Image (tube, coloured by chain):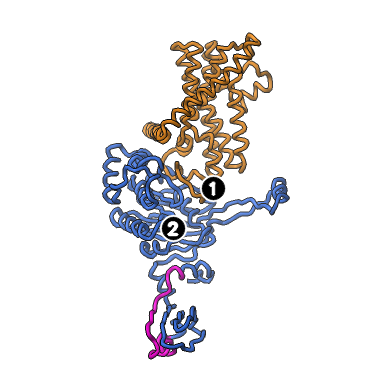
Chain colours: A blue, B orange
């Protein structure tokens, strides 16, 4: 069942333009110039119930604007959207009972209060009776291992503990969909891994649909089965992670340590990425050059150590961001 | 509907409770803020005492009536800044796109926003208001009328500030106009309304509604008139509705932001 449906969604912002210097400032008072930016440009997609979707793109791509429209924060310029069968622009309050939001860059917790007091406050916001809030806090405390710091003021918590509490606060009313906007920003690798585990657990045990934006490839690779890539307000790609990798994994990286230097040059299907002493790093396009031929060129007898790997997902996504041709995938 | 109102009020008072708890973390600052605000307000009365030593009445007001005027003005300011402090900072929230959290919550955005912060020094203003009433001469009817007018005055002041703040949905630097007009209203409410005539008087009952927040309530307390009471209630209801209307209309133009922010 589709839980999010977006059709031809647009959001335009009118921005005032000013020429440089004091002259420009005075001129803009009497003759203001405006330009229209298409932050979200005619996008359409849908999300299945229980799915974990990565919605990614470079800075200024339109990710946050899309999330803000789906959560009822912003009104779209045009287009249709339904979230859990509700139109966010028309029934914002009704929608709020069914969704949770975590913005990694914006705290919604009261920093001087303990997580417990915060959860009580959020319980009241969602009209949950006192007795029920207590039970819910107890459940979430156990599930998300908050025992240690549930009574410590939020301002004294580490960033990782704080984000964990932000996620719990957004789950207090058992939302069907959770919007996570860069939830692991600024976290160390261990805490990131913990947060990812929580998200996975939440999806598995509570069946929560997760709509995730992140610049962290680890988040996407470890959590999501489907990815939508957006840039300049347009969707560049909407595909499964497996397909994304399959299309781009025709390129391999060979890192080799040789007994002596070999004379390998750039040619069709082979590009030398790094050459230092007897060490070599080469990118091979296996649609143009067989791996066996490359190994032969390197001379098997001279190889001390060799490592063949796929191109990192990060590089794949960066190339999609940069390469407009990716539209034809 | 009734349940919705009840839940909204519950959240408003929970928010007030948490804001006071926040300020009470530092007890010394908490108490000195309140005490110094009372002393600060009291210092203005000295100016009036000097004026009344030169003249018997000003605009028909005696010193005790000016004390009552200060009392209403002070408690009006106090209640509005205790319950609706963010209505005075609405322009900043709109210009810098800080309404996101409130928009994702299933409550009335306008009420949720304006009641999300409390000025602790305003407790000093409220206490000072009732000290003035005590000095003027307290009795049951005075106390009831004073309390009613402090509440209607606070609602008018907060609504006025919200209407001006909401103009920032349309005007980028609307905060300057909003702050100036709110400050004008606060300045005018400590002078006897009778000293203003013709055009200025019209302005003070329309563009800057200090007449309905302070002057008419004082007149009603001095010479009770049921019609005045009806006018005050009607105007209060009208300005509240207008504040809701303007805010909700402007909200469609809200453009959020990606600024890092936290709720402190």
Does B245 appear in magenta?
Answer: no
Does A299 appear in magenta?
Answer: yes
Q: Which residues are magenta?
A: A290-315
The vertical placement of A244 against A116, above or below, is below
Q: Is residue B1 visible?
A: no
The vertical placement of B97 against B207, above or below, is below
Answer yes or no: are tags 2 and 1 on the same subunit: no
Residue drawn 30% across the image and 48% down it? A146
Determine whether, in the image, residue A243 is placed left or right of residue B171.
Answer: left
Q: Which residue is more in the foreground, A95 or B192?
A: B192
Q: CA distance from mark 2 to mark 1?
A: 19 Å
Q: Position of residue A237 (x, y in %)?
A: 47, 66
Q: Residues within 10 Å of mark 2 (few under 14, many from 20)?
A: many
Q: Residue B253 appears in which quarter of the rendering? A: top right
Q: Is residue B52 visible?
A: yes
Residue drawn 49% across the image and 79% down it? A274
Q: Quadrant of the N terminus of chain A?
A: bottom left
Q: Position of residue A59 (x, y in %)?
A: 51, 59
Query: Regarding mark 1 in the picture, which secondary structure is present there?
Result: loop
Q: Are marks 2 and 1 in contact (CB under 8 Å)?
A: no
Q: Residue B19 appears in which quarter of the rendering? A: top left
Residue B255's disc is 1
> Residue under circle 2?
A213
Q: Which residue is more in the foreground, B118 or A52?
A: B118
Q: Position of residue B60 (x, y in %)?
A: 62, 11
Query: Regarding mark 2 in the picture, which secondary structure is present there?
Result: strand
Q: Position of residue A19 (x, y in %)?
A: 69, 53
| Chain ID at mark 2 | A
């Amino acid at each position: 069942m589709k839980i999010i449906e977006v059709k031809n969604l647009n959001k335009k912002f009118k921005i005032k333009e000013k020429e440089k210097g004091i002259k420009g400032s005075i001129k803009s008072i009497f003759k203001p110039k405006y330009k229209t930016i298409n932050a979200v440009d005619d996008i359409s997609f849908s999300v299945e119930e229980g799915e974990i979707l990565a919605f990614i793109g470079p800075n200024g791509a339109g990710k946050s604007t899309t999330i803000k429209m789906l959560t009822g924060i912003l009104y779209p310029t045009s287009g249709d959207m339904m979230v859990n069968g509700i139109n966010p622009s028309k029934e914002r309050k009704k929608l709020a009972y069914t969704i949770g939001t975590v913005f990694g860059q914006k705290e919604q917790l009261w920093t001087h209060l303990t997580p417990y007091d915060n959860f009580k406050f959020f319980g009241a916001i969602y009209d949950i009776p006192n007795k029920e809030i207590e039970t819910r806090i107890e459940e979430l405390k156990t599930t998300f291992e908050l025992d240690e710091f549930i009574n410590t003021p939020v301002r004294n918590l580490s960033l990782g503990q704080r984000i964990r509490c932000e996620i719990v606060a957004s789950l207090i009313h058992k939302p069907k969909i959770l919007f996570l906007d860069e939830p692991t920003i600024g976290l160390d690798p261990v805490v990131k891994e913990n947060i990812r585990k929580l998200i996975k657990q939440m999806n598995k045990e509570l069946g929560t649909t997760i709509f995730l934006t992140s610049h962290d490839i680890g988040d996407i690779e470890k959590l999501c089965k489907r990815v939508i890539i957006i840039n300049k307000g347009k969707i560049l790609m909407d595909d499964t992670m497996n397909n994304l990798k399959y299309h781009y994994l025709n390129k391999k990286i060979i890192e080799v340590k040789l007994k002596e230097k070999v004379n390998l040059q750039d040619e069709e299907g082979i590009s030398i990425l790094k050459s230092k002493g007897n060490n070599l790093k080469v990118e091979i396009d296996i649609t143009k050059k067989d791996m066996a031929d490359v190994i032969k060129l390197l001379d098997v007898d001279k190889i001390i150590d060799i490592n063949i790997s796929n191109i990192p997902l990060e590089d794949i996504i960066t190339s999609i961001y940069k390469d407009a041709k990716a539209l034809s995938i | 509907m009734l349940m919705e109102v009840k839940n909204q009020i519950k959240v408003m008072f929970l928010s007030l409770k948490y804001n006071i708890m926040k300020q009470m973390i530092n007890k010394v600052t908490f108490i000195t803020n309140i005490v110094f605000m009372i002393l600060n307000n009291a210092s203005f009365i000295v100016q009036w005492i000097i004026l009344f030593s030169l003249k018997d009445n000003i605009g028909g007001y005696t010193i005790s009536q000016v004390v009552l005027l200060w009392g209403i003005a002070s408690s009006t300011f106090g209640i509005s800044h205790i319950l609706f402090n963010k209505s005075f900072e609405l322009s900043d929230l709109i210009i810098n796109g800080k309404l996101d959290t409130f928009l994702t919550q299933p409550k009335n955005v306008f009420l949720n926003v304006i009641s999300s912060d409390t000025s602790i020094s305003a407790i000093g203003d409220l206490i000072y208001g009732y000290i003035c009433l005590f000095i003027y001469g307290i009795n049951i009817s005075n106390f009831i009328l004073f309390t009613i007018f402090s509440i209607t005055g606070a609602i008018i002041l907060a609504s006025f500030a919200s209407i001006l703040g909401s103009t920032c949905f349309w005007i980028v630097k609307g905060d300057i106009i909003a702050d100036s007009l709110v400050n004008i209203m606060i300045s005018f409410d400590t002078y006897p309304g009778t000293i203003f005539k013709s055009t200025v008087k019209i302005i003070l009952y329309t563009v800057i509604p200090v007449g309905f927040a302070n002057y008419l309530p004082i007149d009603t307390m001095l010479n009770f008139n049921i019609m005045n009471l009806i006018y005050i209630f009607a105007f209060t209801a009208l300005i509240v509705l207008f504040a809701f209307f303007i805010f909700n209309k402007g909200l469609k133009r809200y453009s959020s932001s990606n600024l890092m922010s936290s709720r402190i």
